[in-house]
Image (tube, coloured by chain):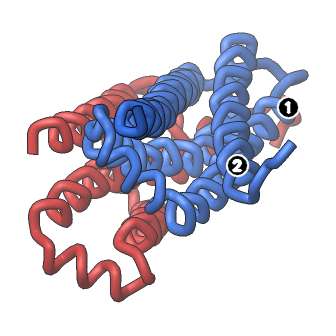
Chain colours: A blue, B red
Amino acid sequence: MNITASDAILLAHSTFGVLGTLSAVWVFVETLNAGERNAGRLRRAASVTALAMVAALILGGYWYLHFYPADKATILKGPWPWAHTVFMETKEHLFFITLILSFYFPIAARDKLRANAMARKMVLCVAMLIALSGLAIEGAGAIINHGAKVALLHANAEAAGGSR
Amino acid sequence: MSLDSPNTASEELASESGPKLGRASAAFALSAAVTILFNTALACVKDAYAPLTEFMNRLAGHNWTTQGLADVVLFFGLGLVLSKTNLAGRISPDRLILFLAVAVVVGGAGLFIWFALF
């Protein structure tokens, strides 16, 4: 088994992204049942979301700056260049929106949600926005990954055709 | 003060017009919405104007890194400034929630449309 640093960092990046998205859903459910007993857990879950997204940012940012240029060149030569020009370009900037929402999440969760309907509404809204944007980013990641795959398959097919 | 009297930031701001967000929550919600719109605008402008991309590349080694740092500094800086004032507290919570949601939808869709069309 040959797992490179690039592979490990990329998989850790998407794992933390999924964990951040899932913990936003966790906060959503806790908020629907907000009370005295789950107030601390809810705030901790909101902080977990922020920490997971920061980890996803650091890992993804490092991978993007150090390893992605080679993948980008491959994708642009393949049949799905828009996997980079549309989806990667959107993803790398959309992530900042999710990140800002994740930074705001623990701040919004500090209000006394049990007693304040508006504070609950804000946390529910932010949780939903983090979860939906997180899913969109994961989907974009899958398209980018497939863009690289079809480019390599295309290059292999051409090489095989040329060698006949 | 009795033990059962409310004493949280959010409840202190509750008024006759209904429950309000805590001062920090309202301030940083407004800051988040502004930062999200700024992020999309900056992404489009730097994509269209190469000298800005080059300038941002020089600032932090890569334009993406510079953009991320600018977003974080704007979010926390503006949020702290707004926390000192009562500007965000004067906006109704419903409007703040709507503004934040619209900013995310417009910001996200704006990025996709920009990179798909240009």
Left or right of A55 on screen, residue A137:
left
Q: Output the chain of dot 1.
A: A
| Residue to which mark 2 is pinned | A7
Residue at the location (59% across, 23% down)?
A120
Is residue B112 rendered to the left or right of residue B8?
Answer: left
The residue at the point 73 percent across, 22 percent down is A26
| Nearer the camera: disc 1 or disc 2 | 2
User: Whole-Å distance between the Cαs marked 1 and 2?
Assistant: 33 Å
Q: Which residue is mark 1?
A: A41
* Quadrant where the image shows the C terminus of chain A: top left
Q: Chain of mark 2?
A: A
Residue drawn at x 35%, y 72% is: B63
Whether A156 is drawn above or below A117: the answer is: below
Tell me if residue A86 can be seen. Answer: yes
Disc 1 or 2, which lies upstream in sequence? 2
| Residue B99 visible in rendering | no
